[in-house]
Amino acid sequence: MPDDDRLNRWERRTGAALTVLGALFLAAYAVRVLRPGLSSTGHTVIAVIEYVTWGALAVDLAVRLRLTSDRRRFLRTHVFDLVVLALPMIRPLRVLRVLSLLIVVHRRVTRASRLRLSVYVGGTTALIIFVASLAVLDAERRAPGSNIHTYLDALWWTMTTVSTVGYGDHFPVTVEGRFLAMGLMVGGIGLLGFVTGSLASWFIDQFSELQESEEETREDVADLVAEVRALRAEIASLRAERAA
Amino acid sequence: MPDDDRLNRWERRTGAALTVLGALFLAAYAVRVLRPGLSSTGHTVIAVIEYVTWGALAVDLAVRLRLTSDRRRFLRTHVFDLVVLALPMIRPLRVLRVLSLLIVVHRRVTRASRLRLSVYVGGTTALIIFVASLAVLDAERRAPGSNIHTYLDALWWTMTTVSTVGYGDHFPVTVEGRFLAMGLMVGGIGLLGFVTGSLASWFIDQFSELQESEEETREDVADLVAEVRALRAEIASLRAERAA
Amino acid sequence: MPDDDRLNRWERRTGAALTVLGALFLAAYAVRVLRPGLSSTGHTVIAVIEYVTWGALAVDLAVRLRLTSDRRRFLRTHVFDLVVLALPMIRPLRVLRVLSLLIVVHRRVTRASRLRLSVYVGGTTALIIFVASLAVLDAERRAPGSNIHTYLDALWWTMTTVSTVGYGDHFPVTVEGRFLAMGLMVGGIGLLGFVTGSLASWFIDQFSELQESEEETREDVADLVAEVRALRAEIASLRAERAA
Amino acid sequence: MPDDDRLNRWERRTGAALTVLGALFLAAYAVRVLRPGLSSTGHTVIAVIEYVTWGALAVDLAVRLRLTSDRRRFLRTHVFDLVVLALPMIRPLRVLRVLSLLIVVHRRVTRASRLRLSVYVGGTTALIIFVASLAVLDAERRAPGSNIHTYLDALWWTMTTVSTVGYGDHFPVTVEGRFLAMGLMVGGIGLLGFVTGSLASWFIDQFSELQESEEETREDVADLVAEVRALRAEIASLRAERAA
């Protein structure tokens, strides 16, 4: 499959550029949430970063679709990416749009780089906590009856949710914030389940391999027993011949 | 056991029909909870679906009891089904009746179809969350002092409970809703315990098998050593004979 | 060690009687908590049951100390029992006294009977939830500012605590109730840790055994190789002799 | 490496003295938090203990740096210790300063002594709960709108947080207290992850070893089969010779 070699080369070569773009996009989002009273120049810069990121991801997806050898499979495994890139035109929900774009960037970037599992899990968790705090602050800050008004409130809420402590001194009250929180709960349990499941299936694979190897050893020993018995019969017949 | 072949055939053949009936029953319950101001025609349709489901389950249980080879064992392992089918006549608790009927349908349908474990656990969890939200809304909506009034409130409460976050911004106050919540807690911990326990017992079984196999290999090798020693003695006696 | 045979016989023979006494003691405690306005006759009956249980445990401990072969070790592993039996004279805390007596009865009774692990864990958890609800109700019911007034409140609080959901709609406010809750938290985490740890150490033991067995197999095979090589040298010398 | 022998000797010899100093430092902190209205003599004693501890740790770090064979590696793995010892001059946060000094003492002392894993985990958890309760009480007691005023409140809050129950009847409201709580959540999850991860990696190592050993056994058996086959050919040729 020479085509998939070209796909892998493309993904490796553009990985660094997309990482930078993803970090810029995240920074732009952080600025927009943490500095609500921004000048119009600031707003323009942020909008440009958002459109460039969106455009770069669309171009990247198109190139990768052209370079893959099995296009049907590629489309099937990248439905989420396609939906997210089509999303901004059909839905006005800012939090949802930003979060899904960040998920696409994250999946795309981690495909191109290899990290130790502990660094990856730790870094992703820290990133999720940082971004979720921004997103919930964005959704809740101006809602009537809300109790999340500063970034510290939002970070505090995210930490008590992710650790499942859940004091209830701060919690989202908007539809947007609540669905974000549900995503955080599902994601947390999902990440835990993924790590546990991967470990368990690794053990199951190793076990099957070990059992197969052990079975083959037993078959080899059985062959050996037959061989030695034949040898003994040979010698017995040799002796009988001599006696005759 | 030709009787159990017939039982399995019956369970497989009626599986699809019961799945459809279960989905209809669930939809009817959802409509009744989510649309309280329903026309009398709507109420009649829902009541018909409930009675048909109940009747179908009773007939199915009777047929399966007739087809099984070991009737005593069947009755022992299906006490819950019998109690649930007898329940509607003796208790007026709607939530309890609906939930137990759904549990019976679920157990009956999953017997007839085979799913991958991850799909099964994920699907069942989603179903439990959806149904528990309906049930707690049904129980709490009109209770004095209640704080669960919309389906979003109920879904939010179910998610914070299942993830054990438990903010305490929404919680059941009726006896019915509290027992439902306790069931959810026990069920959640039970499901986790079941998955962990199954995995652990799978490993224990595999280990015992591997150890037995390893022990048999060792016995085979010991036999082989004895065999080769006998062979050597044979040759030594052959040589002694020749020397004589 | 004939002395320990006599100890085991004593423990097995008195197990049933202590189970009945423990159940009676628990029932008496439940009645005292759930029926606050009891007649003086009722109070007398309860007090008699409490004193008989306490006396029986003291006699049982003395007999077991006399029957054991290693008295120093017995005293070291039964410090908790000794402290609990000395407790009622020096402290007036009813909840603490009742709970520790129940722990002693439970440990003593489970020594004498063998249960399947799942039944044991399930039964103990149910018992803990039942007794902790009684104890927290006993401690909180009449405290100023308390929010646990009925057995349903207490059961609901215990369930939300044990499942770590912790809504915060009900919680203990007295010193007694709070220490009870801390015990419940520590006990729950301890039970989980005990089950996980037992499983892990079981696997570690099995692994060491399997590895030792595998090593011995390899040594056996090495012996066998030496044996066959000797055999081959024998035949080679036999042939050289013949050729001479 | 004779230098590292001298490092280990130093660490073992000064371990007891540092344990005593650490306990004194902890006791001084406990007195300062639990007895706010202390005489000026008391304050002087506490300040002396704090400065002596700080000085002893600085001297100890300098000696160890001198005794180690690979200084670059020592500096890299002790960045935290260096930052903590430089901290008191640049930041006025008492809770942070005390906690980081206690972490340094704890790491230094446990390097010099060997404990059973269960004792270590249990003891560390108890210590964390005791110190975190002191620290949160120190941070929250006089804050406006705070709900943690006594040591029992603080202990109760720590327990509900560590067990992830989180009722929400008590929670920190100051920036200091909230960061302390986040550290507690991260630390708790981190400790759990560390224990689980260690166990899993132990199993993975053992598995690889067992599989290698099994593979070598199979190779040995295959060699043996070849050996026996050669032996059989030898005897066949012997017989052919005789027949000729």
Image (tube, coloured by chain):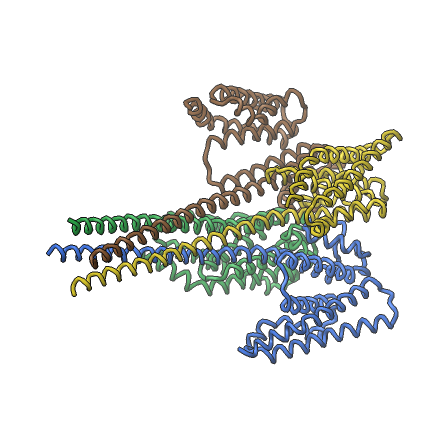
Chain colours: A yellow, B blue, C green, D brown
Residue D77 in the image, given as x and y percentages of width and height: 55, 27
Disc tally is 0
Residue at 56% of width from left, 25% of height from top?
D76
Q: Residue at x 59, y 56 (%)?
A: B195
* Residue at the extreme left of the image, as rendered: B244
Pinpoint residue A220: horizontal percent, then vertical percent: 38, 55
Q: Nearer the viewer, residue B3 or A146?
A: B3
Name the residue nearer the viewer: B96 or A17: A17
Whether residue C110 is situated above or below residue B164 in the rendered picture: below
Can residue C225 be seen here? yes
Looking at the rendering, in which quadrant would you find the N terminus of chain D? top left
Position of A8 relative to C114 (above/below): above
Q: Residue D120, relative to residue B89: is it above or below? A: above
Measuring from the top left, give residue D87's x and y in whole percent.
Answer: 63, 23
Residue A3 location, quadrant: top right
- Residue D78 as seen in the image, left or right of residue D93: left
The image quadrant where one finds the C terminus of chain D is bottom left
Q: Nearer the viewer, residue D171 or D202?
A: D202
Q: Position of residue C218 (x, y in %)?
A: 36, 49
Q: Residue furthest bottom?
A: B66
> Does the rendering let one see residue C134?
no
